[in-house]
Image (cartoon, rainbow, N blue to C red):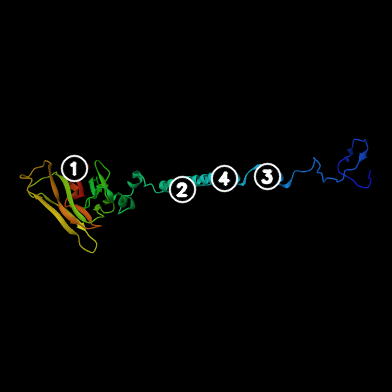
């Protein structure tokens, strides 16, 4: 037995028929059964196991794309909600002023009157009961009874005019009623309508009625008479229309007996 050679496994001896031990003529290059698998086997097992933590790269990429799509959808919805909220805020800020506020702005061509130009241009005002002094140019009340102004027509409190803010053809009318306490055949009065226009120093007379002879006999009784004027007139933008009565102190002291108005044809 040769003691200088070492083998990874116990030595193999051959036993012949004579019972003696013999060394094998050639020592085989044996591989232990507990050695690692060959490189080909390890490569196949690595391919089966896949990528990081057992997840294939294709599957990981698909999951990542799904997450990106979800976050993109959430971001788009947030943007849409923000845009709708901004539009709603702008609509609330652009709401028109209530009519109760526009009714307070009746002097001159106010902004409220300009916003009402989509309505028909018209106005109807009734007589205003004056104090001791009665000017010939009558004053009116745009809110008493059936009084109103619309479509850009405004009433001027300072001088009693109806002002139009659009050039066109208008029907203009006025009625006055007077009561004479000492009526006589000489009793008379003038009922006049005129317009003041920019660029003209003097007013332009539109209509006039001269009433006389309504009292046939001299009497101490009161006598009531009236006058009505009405016609179509071409008016220009910012024209101011007035009504004059020569004897305003004899006007009947009832608001609905005296009125003045116009409307665009």
Q: Which one is nearer the viewer's eye here, 29 or 224?
A: 29
- Residue farthest to the front, as pictured: 18
Mark 4 or mark 3: name the one nearer the start of the chain.
Answer: 3
User: In the image, residue 23 lies at what x, y percent?
Assistant: 90, 43
Whether residue 113 can be seen here: yes
At mark 3, the secondary structure is helix
Q: Quadrant of residue 11?
A: top right
Which image quadrant: the N terminus?
top right
Task: Please give the label number shown on residue 99.
Answer: none
Q: In x, y percent, where is residue 194?
A: 18, 56
Write down the residue under mark 1.
257
Q: CA distance from mark 1 to mark 4?
A: 89 Å
Q: Are marks 4 and 3 in contact (CB under 8 Å)?
A: no
Q: Nearer the viewer, residue 26 or 232?
A: 26
Q: CA distance from mark 2 to mark 3?
A: 57 Å
Which of pointers 2 and 3 indicates the residue nearer the eye? 3
Q: Give the mark nearer the N terminus: 1 vs 2.
A: 2
Any part of residue 131 in sight:
no
Residue at (18, 59) in percent of width and height: 204
> Of helix, strand and loop, which one carries label 4?
helix
| Mark 1 / mark 4, whichever is N-terminal | 4
Q: Residues within 10 Å of mark 1 (few under 14, many from 20)?
A: some
Relative horizontal placement of residue 250, taking residue 64 as reference (left or right): left
Looking at marks 4 and 2 on the same chain, the residue that comes earlier in the sequence is marked by 4
Instruction: Measure the C-alpha gap from mark 4 to mark 3.
Output: 25 Å
Dot placed on the residue nearer the N-terminal end, 2 or 3? 3
Mark on residue 62? 4
Rate crowding at label 3 as few (under 14), some (14 to 19) or many (20 or more) other CA atoms within 10 Å. few
Badge number at residue 44: 3
Which residue matches tag 2? 83
């Amino acid at each position: 037995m040769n003691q200088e050679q070492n083998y990874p496994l116990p030595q193999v001896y051959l036993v012949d028929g004579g019972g003696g031990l013999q060394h094998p003529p050639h020592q085989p290059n044996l591989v232990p059964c507990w050695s690692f698998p060959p490189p080909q086997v390890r490569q196949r097992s690595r391919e089966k196991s896949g990528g990081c933590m057992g997840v294939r790269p294709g599957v990981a990429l698909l999951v990542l794309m799904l997450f990106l799509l979800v976050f993109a959808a959430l971001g788009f919805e947030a943007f849409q909600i923000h845009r709708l909220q901004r539009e709603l805020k702008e609509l609330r800020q652009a709401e028109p002023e209530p009519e109760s506020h526009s009714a307070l702005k009746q002097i001159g061509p106010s902004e409220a009157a300009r916003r009402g130009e989509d309505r028909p241009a018209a106005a109807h005002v009734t007589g205003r009961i004056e104090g001791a002094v009665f000017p010939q140019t009558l004053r009116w009340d745009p809110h008493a009874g059936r009084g109103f102004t619309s479509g850009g027509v405004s009433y001027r409190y300072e001088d009693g005019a109806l002002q139009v803010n659009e050039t066109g053809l208008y029907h203009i009318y006025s009625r006055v009623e007077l009561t004479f306490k000492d009526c006589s055949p000489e009793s008379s009065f003038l009922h006049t309508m005129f317009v003041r226009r920019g660029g003209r120093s003097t007013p332009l007379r539109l209509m006039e009625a001269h009433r006389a002879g309504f009292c046939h006999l001299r009497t101490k009784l009161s006598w009531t008479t009236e006058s009505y004027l009405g016609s179509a007139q071409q008016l220009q933008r910012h024209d101011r229309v007035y009504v004059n009565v020569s004897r305003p102190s004899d006007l009947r002291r009832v608001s609905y007996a005296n009125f003045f108005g116009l409307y665009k044809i």
